[in-house]
Image (spheres, grey):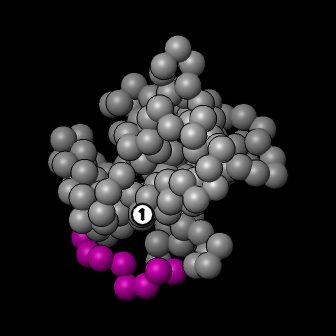
Amino acid sequence: MGKTSDLNKLVFTIGKRYGTFNPFTWADKLNLDIQWKELLPKPLAKTVYFFDEPVIMMSNSIKYSNQRYFVLAHEIGHVLEHKGLAAYYVSNKVHKRKTEVEADTFAMAVVTNLYVEENGCLPETYADLRYNYGLPFLGN
């Protein structure tokens, strides 16, 4: 992924194409396989590739939680922008941190636009996004 402005353009383009910013709709339209599994205690989700096709494994612990929106958007960010980097990602901690920040930035743009779609305005606080879509605590 690139700069934040490029991520925002990508998110807006996909949202416009599919008529929503709901990451579950995006996953469906992109033919992404989502599997709910026991992944406790962490990670909350992980994308793996089978025969070059991504499978997003989501933790049952968030299946009915608002957190599933942010987590899925994060994984979609990896699928769209980090495909083919899995082996390098695991072996290089600096690159891993960078790709995680990029996926978080992508997910933040998705859920912020989803908030606007559902509420007709920008959120007043970060806590609004945390409550509605399970964003992580700042600093974690």
Left or right: where 117 falls relative to 24 = left
Of residues 40 and 130, which is closer to you in this image? 40
Q: Quadrant of residue 55?
A: top right
Residue toward you, 122 or 74: 74
Residue drawn 35% across the image and 63% down it: 109
Please, what is the dominant secondary structure of the magenta stretch? Answer: loop
Q: Position of residue 122 (x, y in %)?
A: 30, 76
Residue 122 higher or lower than 1, as above or below: below
Left/right of residue 5 with respect to residue 71 in the rendered view: left
SS at circle 1 = helix
The kind of residue on which mark 1 rests is Thr
* Residue located 32% across and 57% down the image: 2
Which picture quadrant has residue 121?
A: bottom left
**Can the viewer see residue 78 in this picture?**
yes
Residue holding disc 1: 105
Front residue of 94 and 112: 94
Residue 29 at what x, y percent from top left? 33, 31
Tell me if residue 49 comes above or below residue 112 in the rendering.
Answer: above
80 horizontally vs 75: left or right: left
| Number of marks present in the image shown | 1
Residue stretch in magenta: 120-127
Q: Residue furthest bottom?
A: 124
Residue at image location 64% in from the left, 55% down from the top: 93
Vertical placement of residue 71 versus 133, above or below: above
Q: Residue furthest top?
A: 51
Label 1, residues with CA under 10 Å away: few <14, some 14-19, many ≥20: some
x then y, percent, for residue 75: 51, 45
Name the residue: 51% across, 80% down: 127
Q: Is residue 46 magenta?
A: no
Residue 63 appearing in the image: no
Image quarter of residue 6: bottom left
